[in-house]
Amino acid sequence: MPSSGFGNAYQRAGRTTGVFPDIEYLEWIIGRPEVAMYDLGTSDLRGDRDRGGEIVPAPLEDLDDPPTGASLEMQIAGEYGVEPEQVLVTGGATQANFLAAAAALDTDTEGDADAAGARVLVEKPGYEPLVASPAALGAHVDRFLRDDDYALAPDRVENALAPETALVTVTNRHNPSGRLTDRETLAETAAVAREGGARLLVDEVYAPYLPEAGDGPFGGPSAVDFEDAVVTGSLTKFFGLGDLRIGWVVADEAFVERARSISHHFHAVSGPSRTLAMRAFHNRERLAERSRTLLGENAELLAEFVSSRDDLAGSVAPGSTFAFLDPANADGNALAERAWENGLLVVPGRFFGDSERVRVSLGLAPNEMAAALDTFGDVLDRFR
């Protein structure tokens, strides 16, 4: 496999640049899906790996635009059952999560950034930017473990809270394991956070990953109606429209206004992306049908593959197209390196806080995913 400049990606890990630390996962992943022969690293439901570079993404071609007078904020608000003033459109979910953390930490400290001694509590294993962003904002980041097959346990959150905790951050589905948390558990976690003086932030980009749609936004469970909860989402994962770079924050109006004020320090969301995002929302049922077809086929492929291997520990959550797996005969770094040498992209678990594992994701067409899993099996066999 040609290095394409990636050979030193592991060596770059740990470098920092001033106030803002590198987000090592993003440093590592950029450019790899485009050159990998087999891609088990991409978690968004793109389907066609050859997409990219179009002015109008292929899934949105020939679809109707919404009526004049609508706004993207109105469309998102309608999906979540809130007012448009409770929605902030952002340049993707990573920016949404950054702004949510910044708003939660932006308390009245009379200009002294350290006066509050603010802390953020984040799940482990977890998605690295959710740790790196609040750390860059000056917060102390505490962690709580998700074990018992990565279930979210409100009592663990309660035990890990400190008086200075301003924000508790979780993902649903859990990234990297794919574990789905029900609304009752989310509600209990939100209540625990609120009683401790903190808000609950739920990154819900994977919440719609269900074979059949439920009653929540895009068919997935949501924490949007819980007191002091903040939710984020995007068009990248479930709809496979990452090229638009459209995300959002949904919360109470005062919180969103604070996040909006902070957002002026960042680039504005592209006008053409907004327009195409409105088209996507206007046709979301049609787009969701396509995504759920892909989701169902790939979830079945992944579950069958994992169950067929005696050298790969870990479970595939029902309906999930990604999982956090523990190879019996290698650690996550060694397996990911060997896979890359054979043209296969899998993500080392160290980026999520567990170097023994790898995250495996099926986001492309089922025939491509079947071939990628065959290659993954060959790589695993070489460690026997």
Image (cartoon, rainbow, N blue to C red):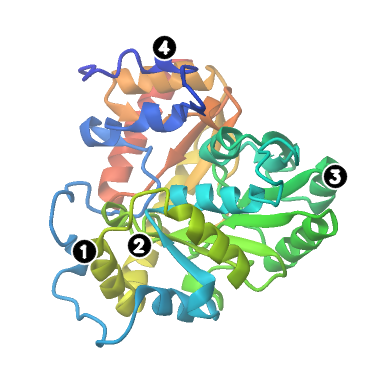
- Residue 209, position as x, y percentages in the image: 48, 60
Q: Which mark is residue 239?
A: 2
Q: Looking at the figure, which quarter contains the N terminus? A: top left
Between 277 and 354, the residue placed more toward the observer is: 277
User: Type of residue at label 4?
Assistant: Gln
**What's the CA distance linking mark 4 and mark 3?**
38 Å
Callout 2 crowding tier (Cα within 10 Å): few <14, some 14–19, many ≥20:
many
Callout 1 crowding tier (Cα within 10 Å): few <14, some 14–19, many ≥20:
few
Q: In the image, what residue occupies the spot 54% across and 81% down?
A: 81
Q: Which of the 4 quarters of the picture holds residue 201?
A: bottom right
Q: Regarding mark 1 in the picture, which secondary structure is present there? A: helix
Lower position in the chain sequence, tag 4 or tag 3? 4
Are the residues tagged 1 and 2 within 8 Å (C-beta)? no
Which residue is disc 4 drawn over? Answer: 11
Lower position in the chain sequence, tag 1 or tag 3? 3
Relative height, residue 157 to residue 126 (above, below): below
Q: Is residue 22 left or right of residue 114?
A: left
Relative height, residue 120 to residue 6 (above, below): below
**What's the CA distance linking mark 2 and mark 3?**
39 Å
Q: In the image, what residue occupies the spot 31% across and 68% down?
A: 290
Which residue is disc 1 drawn over? Answer: 272
Q: In the image, what residue occupies the spot 68% across and 44% down?
A: 150
Can you tell which of label 4 and label 3 is closer to the viewer? Answer: 3
Lower position in the chain sequence, tag 1 or tag 2? 2
User: Type of residue at label 1?
Assistant: Pro
**What's the CA distance linking mark 1 and mark 2?**
17 Å
- Residue 73, position as x, y percentages in the image: 41, 74
User: Type of residue at label 2?
Assistant: Phe
Q: Regarding mark 3 in the picture, which secondary structure is present there? A: loop
